[in-house]
Amino acid sequence: MATPRHPCAIDLSVLELATFMRVYRSGKPSSAEEIAATLSIWFRCDIIGADLRDMLVGMVSRGFLANHARGFVRATSHGRRHARPHLYGVVQMLDSGTKMLDAAVMLSLVGIAAHELDGEIDNETIVD
């Protein structure tokens, strides 16, 4: 496993964090094309599976995702532990003392995602 680029291991891009959340939430192995379809909706831009392949290989090599049959990937427990501080950072960044309704709604949605990562679900034993 590669050494983190930052001493606090804050080293996921927004796209990597979104990819991890997409794979984790699916609960089943996902192809690059399936991930790209969801991210296209989330980011409101066209993303194709080929756009993600190098990033997915990197996430697998860092232990955040695991290879699965026929080029599919799945989330790992290590990835969940690693994504948690990134997600909390997003929550704190959005909070920043604002009292706007939009920020409150966004914090609620991000809080739901944070709760998912805090759970004791073990996706290491996915069976086809």
Image (cartoon, rainbow, N blue to C red):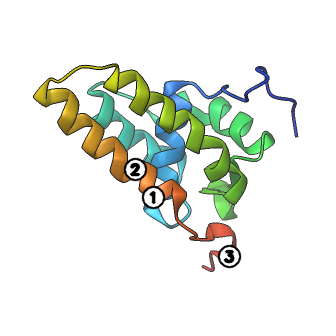
Which of the 4 quarters of the picture holds residue 12?
Answer: top right
**Secondary structure at numbered mark 3:** helix
Label 2 – label 1 distance at C-alpha: 5 Å
Q: Amino acid at mark 1?
A: Glu
Q: Is residue 91 above or below residue 35?
A: above
With 86 as the anchor, is 11 left or right in this view? right
Picture residue at 44% right of the left edge, 61% below the top? 26
Q: Are marks 2 and 1 in contact (CB under 8 Å)?
A: yes
- The three-letter amino acid code for the residue at tag 2 is Ala
CA–CA distance between discs 1 and 3?
A: 17 Å
Q: Which mark is residue 125?
A: 3
According to the image, label 2 marks what residue? Answer: 113
Mark 2 and mark 3: Cα distance apart in space: 21 Å
Task: Estimate the x, y position of residue 109 in percent, counting from the top left.
Answer: 28, 45
Residue 87 locus on image (x, y percent): 49, 37
Q: How many marks?
A: 3
Q: Which residue is mark 1?
A: 116
Name which residue lies at 69% across and 62% down.
Answer: 68
Classify mark 2: helix, strand or loop: helix
